[in-house]
Amino acid sequence: MEGAEEEARVQCPVCLRELPAADINSHLDRCLQAGDAEAEPGSSPPSKRPRLAAALPGTQAQGEPEEARPAAAAASPRVFSLFHKGRGGGQSPGAAGRRSGAGREEAAVKPEEGGSAAAAAAGGGANLAQKLEGQPLAERLRPDTLGDYVGQERVLGAQTLLRSLLESHEIPSLILWGPPGCGKTTLAHIIANSSKKNGTRFVTLSATSAKTNDVRDVISQAQNEKRLFKRKTILFIDEIHRFNKSQQDTFLPHVECGTVTLIGATTENPSFQVNAALLSRCRVIVLEKLSVEAMEAILMRAVRSLGVQVLGQGDQHGSSATGSSSESSELPVYIEEKALNTLAYLCDGDARTGLNGLQLAIQARLAAGKTTPLNITKGGSADGILITEEHIKEGLQRSHILYDRAGEEHYNCISALHKSMRGSDENASLYWLARMLEGGEDPLYVARRLVRFASEDIGLADPLALTQAVAAYQGCHFIGMPECEVILAQCVVYFARAPKSIEVYRAYSNVKECLRMHTGPLPPVPLHLRNAPTRLMKNLGYGKGYKYNPMYKEPVEQDYLPEELKGTDFFKERKT
């Protein structure tokens, strides 16, 4: 009987515990969901490294001394979990149970007091350099719950419709529209984490790599799940605007009948990039750029999870600094509060840019600090590695300007430039021009718009404006960027200061309206205005009675409009 019981026990491939065969499946599910958070002090190396085949506290042999456990763990063979990739040991980006940076920090273990330096390094918490290895900081700190989500209070604040739906697990089909780094993918992963607990399948695809067959496979699986197990499926499509119109049509019947709940993320205006039929079946959620306050909160959470201390204005490293120092043999790392504030401003509401810029600055200073540690105290009694505002700026290289030459910001900025010149605000005109050029806009596009503006908004009030615009276009064509930027700036200021007249523009608009509103056949050209190059045409009356104006010294009385439009004045304000 004892032999039969021994054969019925199997070993978990994740934590290496031996369990009855009947319990292995449920245990394996709990083990994978818990991940590195199940580790206890002294049981395994830092969560960022692959697991060692060390026995967990629950499987320690009877009578084994506590001090012998690190040595046994070091001597045991190294086992890599099939569910970990790379040195980071983190889950794949699409995993619903992703741990936040704070959760990983809680899983770090401390070295036992009195142990050797090698034992402390093996059993202690991961040092700062190791924490920054593997996945980017923005990916590692992605929150799991709505409570950890920062920003977008207008959409996800308390008592909002969307938050109430998410908390009640009633997820409608959504299109998340917003600039890069505003939290679209993070919100999708929070929904994934919540839906997994609720028994709903969550499938992630990226329109940059997925094909129509991939979408059909997911829909086919969703149909089977719904028919056999009454289980819902949520399909998240990142960068959904990359799908063409025919690919987007694949979703229509299945979103309509509820086979899948579609969540799409896009940085482009859905009105132009998403089918109207699909838009009518989804609710568009507009996410805005993160505020400076939200960025400061995100960055502060990041430095605390890394164990980096924040120095206020005039603070010494041992006084009122916040956070906790890194528990390793390395020198403590500090960052100026002003540096975090500067980073929050320069990243322009893009959390991904801010966190990755912070990671790059810390990694650069760590590499330099190993050989040249900095003394950051006024008394000179301790050393440390200091990250300043200049290091942050160096990491970003330049201020982060959000501009998409083919997207929403392209049209927003050119509209702002046009309206600023029309309103004679030369300062605003130069600002919007610089926003476009510094963001990478084609200068010839701006020059073409200026040619149009010269006739539309200035017109006959200053006929030289059109000459100025054409000359600016030719100058940009000749020399290109960056030399042509001052040519465009001169033209923009000229137009902002010039008198404005829409007389010609309004008159031509009245003519177009007259043609659109005309009922029946358009009136023929009067015979006396027709050309008569042949004898037949002359015999038909073409050109008969036409008065050649240069032959008359006095003004000539002659009608030039069709009979039905005699007396029409298109330059007068037409009644609407």
Image: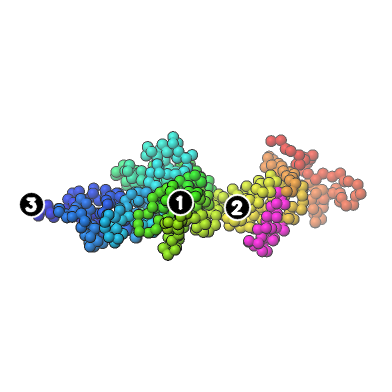
N-terminal label among 1 and 3? 3
**Badge 3 is on which residue?**
1
Q: Check contact, mark 1 vs mark 3: CB within 8 A.
A: no
Element class at badge 2: helix
Magenta-highlighted residues: 470-496
Specify few, some or many for label 3: CA neighbours under 10 Å numbering under 14, 14-19, or 20 or more. few
Q: Which mark is residue 316?
A: 1
Residues under labels 1 and 2: Cα distance?
Answer: 40 Å
Residue nearer the viewer, 436 or 102: 102
* Percent x, y of residue 167: 38, 38
Direction from residue 534 to residue 421 in the image, left or right: left
Q: Is residue 236 visible in the rendered structure shown here?
A: no
Identify the residue at horizontal 44%, vertical 36% (top origin).
Answer: 158
**Badge 2 is on which residue?**
435
Q: Which colour scheme is used?
A: rainbow
Q: Say which amino acid is labelled 2.
A: Arg
Identify the residue at horizontal 45%, vertical 40% (top origin).
Answer: 156
